[in-house]
Amino acid sequence: MLVWSLSAKCLPEKYYLPPIKMTSVCVVLSLVTAYAINFELEGGGISILMAILFLSTIWSVILLPTSLVFKFIIERFFHEKTHNKPLKYVPTTKSVASTGLANARRLAGRYMASER
């Protein structure tokens, strides 16, 4: 929990990972890992808490950089997709068009007067 809480406080908002959810994932992964490798508990049933703490810390250290890299790649990929969209055509109103046309005529008149 401490690893994920520190990452939530230290990282920018776009890389936020919910600490409780990620800690729960690490605890479940540590239980699965302990079952898969047939983890020996030499201290009996009480030592299972230390084993879960140890394995969930290892899973946190593995998952934190992996999830940050994954979020960075996804954010970069979707940022390029949304960043390069073509501009949409927005029809102008008559007042904006006439003002722009008046400015263009005024500037053209200045340009013509400066060439003479």
Image (cartoon, rainbow, N blue to C red):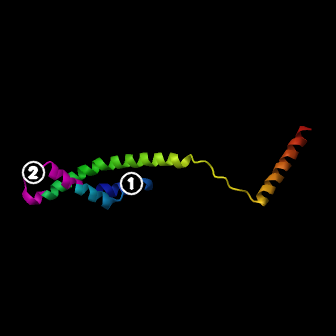
Q: Position of residue 104 (x, y in %)?
A: 82, 49
The secondary element bearing badge 1 is classed as: helix
Residue ID for mark 1: 10
Residue kind at label 2, given as amino acid type: Glu
Q: Residue at x 7, y 53 (%)?
A: 42
- Which numbered disc, 1 or 2, marks the residue closer to the eye? 2
Q: Is residue 10 left or right of residue 26?
A: right
Q: Badge 2: how crowded within 10 Å, few (<14), some, or many (20+)?
A: few
Residue ID for mark 2: 40
Front residue of 104 and 49: 104
Q: Residue at x 45, y 49 (%)?
A: 75
Front residue of 9 and 86: 86
Is residue 49 magenta-colored? no
**Cα–Cα gap, marks 1 and 2:** 36 Å
Q: Is residue 99 left or right of residue 43?
A: right
Q: Name the quadrant containing residue 96.
A: bottom right
State which quarter of the image contains the N terminus: bottom left
Q: Residue at x 19, y 51 (%)?
A: 33
Q: Which residues are magenta?
A: 29-47
Main secondary structure along the magenta-highlighted residues: helix
Front residue of 7 and 65: 65
Q: Residue furthest top?
A: 115
Total marks drawn? 2
Q: Is residue 100 left or right of residue 10?
A: right
Q: Residue at x 61, y 47 (%)?
A: 86
Residue kind at label 1, given as amino acid type: Cys
Q: Position of residue 116 (x, y in %)?
A: 92, 38
